[in-house]
Image (cartoon, grey):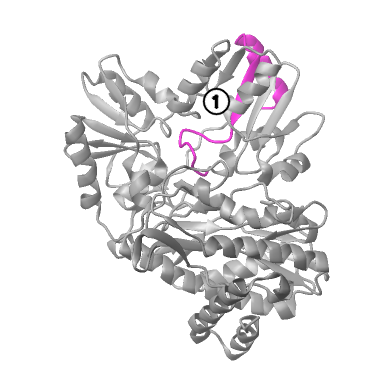
Amino acid sequence: MMIENIRKKMISHGLDAYVVSHGNQFIGQDILPQENKIQSMCGFTGSAGISVITKDKAFLLVDGRYELQARQQTEANQITVVDQMPRFKQVCDLLKELRVLNIGYDAWCHSAAEMEFLKRKYRDMNFYDVGDWITAENTQKICVKERDICYAGKNRGDKLKIITDMLKEKHGDYYLFTSSDSVSWLLNVYADDLPYSPIVRAYALVSKEGEVTLVADNLQTELAVQSWQEFGRFMQEQQNITIFYDAHTMPEKVLSLANETIKLYKSADICQELKSVKNDTELQGMINCHERDGVALVKLLAWLENHWQGLSELDVVAKLHELRAEQPLFYSDSFATIAASAKNGAEVHYQPTVDTNKPLVTGSLFLLDSGGQYFDGTTDVTRTIAIGTPSQEMIYDFTVVLKAHIALAQARFPVGTSGMKLDAVARVEMWKKCLDYKHGTGHGVACFGNVHEGPISISVTGSEYGLQAGMVLSDEPGVYKENKYGIRTENLQYTAEVNDCPEFLEFRYLTKVPIDKRLIDKYLLTEGEREWLNSYHQDVYDTLTPYLNSDEKKWLKDACSPL
């Protein structure tokens, strides 16, 4: 539905504005391309954004990752791109300035907590749930599969006992899990309807007896299932039951489904906390899959050094997927590969298409951000590669980014420190040189699940959730210069107790891929930074050489030689 058609519906409903959200009833989870309402409306394909249409204007709010992309993909005479955190609150601030009072939205796309906050803060505004005016119904069949205990490390029964014990303690009848990654982790299940995230997009209603009912349409599984329509009837027909839910992941719409006798109580989704701490099996799986992933990346980089002439961004994407697919336990890519040649790298989340595909050119930088889903873990790695001879400006910026990366990699901090506090550890190295980046420094990563996993992150606006041993996060500072290049260096790492000092944590890297030494000014590094880099490269070399042929070993030996 185009913007003018939405405006016609607004008039018929007596509205001054309509909010178009990126997601659906699975708040914070990936969506299918055909479910992207914002793309249908204005052409923007990014993974985060929110749009609002008024009677005479239309706005698209995106964060710094998508500022350039949004302006390139939308028509300036139809959409005004606003570089703001893409949340309903920022939309309300904008509408308040425009004196817009009557706002339509889809209550399936916004959490109960978010809407409770907005209705309390913006008392002079009127919010009306008018449903989804854009997305076509998805009728794709979804086959739910069981994840083997040898990869999950903990069986479903043990996980469910934690939930039933909690319900008994709280005197509750049910817990309604509305976060798909929690459901998938809790039940040790996965599905392949999404191209990059093997989660099952469903709710799970868990009773105090440990019985589980999935809620979604089109599921093929031996587990008990209710359709959305059946779930609505359940919420109307049950009498005098108590249901706990997480207000930050449950859509506001669910509140309206319950009859007046049902008691709904807020209670944080305990699975979000539990799954963020990897058990021993999961952590070993993450270590193992990163070694195999490193083999694929090294094979690619060795091949690229001698074959880059005549290659395009999409050629590299295809080759990397081919090399990953050769690795044991490979399942899929963990996100669409970012392969950005030259100035395309300045677009933080650029992903090449047939229409945008560019060749690799001498004297430029090539930014490659990619990852894999393996049955035993998930990877995400970014390397910036010199194509030909880099300029001094490139070398300087790359080295500053590397210093920021190493600063976080070497950090020690008390147990319970929030990622928000750690963000400055990396960023301060950039600030010393008057450089910065408009994205977080790190995000949580699942073990065979979402490559961006909450509740942990390392960001200025990130979670205040305290870090514990066994959590996996990325370390990825960067520099982006419009019409020039982009630079980012990213490793995944996990938190571990400091030897002989268990009240403190440190990071131990998982990613094993060499960092391009041609882009490093060693005189800008401290002795400690050079020692870290040399030690890292020696470990990469020692770990990966048994899996490489003679030419690849030769390339890796040079790439990992001491600085």
Q: Is residue 393 magenta?
A: no
| Mark 1 Cα shell of 10 Å, populated few (<14), some (14-19), many (≥20) | some
Q: Is residue 518 left or right of residue 111?
A: right
Q: Quadrant of the N terminus?
A: top right
Q: Is residue 248 above or below residue 298?
A: above
The picture places residue 216, in percent across and down from the top left corner, at 38, 36
Q: Is residue 313 left or right of residue 256?
A: right
Q: Which residues are magenta?
A: 1-30
Instruction: Look at the numbered disc 1 and give the secondary structure of its residue.
Output: loop
The picture places residue 35, in percent across and down from the top left corner, at 56, 38
Q: Is residue 231 left or right of residue 242?
A: right
Front residue of 194/370: it is 370
Residue in the image at 32% along x and 60% along y: 279
Residue under pointer 1 = 132
Residue in the image at 76% along x and 40% along y: 71
Three-letter residue code for mark 1: Asp
Q: Is residue 549 left or right of residue 65?
A: left
The picture places residue 104, in percent across and down from the top left corner, at 58, 18
